[in-house]
Image (tube, rainbow, N blue to C red):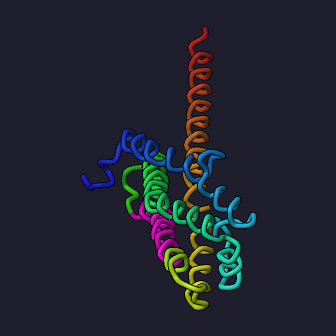
Amino acid sequence: MGFWDRVRARHLGWALAAYAPLAAVMFAPWPGVVGRVAERCGGLEPLDVRTTWDAASAEELLGRCGTAGRRAYVQLELVDLLYPAAAGAATLVATLLLARRVLGPRTAARRALLLLPAAAMTVLDYGENVAVWILLLRRPGPVPALADAAGAVTAAKRVTGTIAFTLPLLLAGALGGIALVRWAGDRIARDHRGRSLRP
């Protein structure tokens, strides 16, 4: 039995228990480190949650942040040291468990393909974080080539992240559909047997 075949529902519980509080710290109204950055940086969203960005938008954001805004952004990035791993683990384990139910046990290659978006999202998120740390710590302003490249990484992270978070929902829907079809088939079979037994 391979490593992925040993993953159980309890592992998803552990992953979600790690992800939920970090997501709350990141995105909830309180403490909401993402919102705090926007509040202290002239209403501009952090680079991490944009669809994409470039050197000009990074320079505009950092120029509006000031000392308080940069401090808030550093707090965001400290939380973001853990958030990508937690999000990646939660989506990866959820996808694996559901894919195993939907596709069956003899589909390791296809299941591995379904795990790629979660893995890619995690790697890209950490790559983005490295670039943001460099931009935050650099004086006086961002490195254009680095910022432009990091914006492309953010765009790729957004795409892979959307797929990674959508796949478990699609698989859960497919599993529900399969269960419904089986239930309907069993119901029809029972009705047919009942009619055939009547005198």
Q: Nearer the viewer, residue 53 or 136?
A: 136
**Horizontal relation, residue 144 to residue 124: left or right:** right
Residue sitting at the far left: 1
**Horizontal relation, residue 56 to residue 12: left or right:** right
Residue sitting at the far right: 43
How many marks the image carries: the answer is 0
Quadrant assignment for the C terminus: top right
Position of residue 194 relative to residue 62, above or below, is above
Residue sitting at the far front: 67
Q: Position of residue 28 (x, y in %)?
A: 63, 47
Residue 114 shows in the view:
no
Q: Position of residue 36 (x, y in %)?
A: 64, 56
**Which range is magenta?**
109-131
Residue sitting at the far bottom: 145
Q: Position of residue 32 (x, y in %)?
A: 61, 51
Residue occupying image coordinates x 32% and y 50%: 5
Question: Main SS of the magenta segment?
Answer: helix
Residue 136 falls within the magenta-colored stretch: no
Q: Nearer the viewer, residue 117 or 149?
A: 149
Residue occupying image coordinates x 47% and y 61%: 78
Q: Position of residue 83 (x, y in %)?
A: 48, 57
Position of residue 184 relative to residue 13, above or below, is above
Residue occupying image coordinates x 57% and y 80%: 150
Q: Nearer the viewer, residue 42 or 66?
A: 66
Residue 121 falls within the magenta-colored stretch: yes
| Residue 53 placement: quadrant | bottom right
Q: Nearer the viewer, residue 114 or 58?
A: 58
Residue 170 shows in the view:
yes
**Horizontal relation, residue 166 to residue 89: left or right:** right
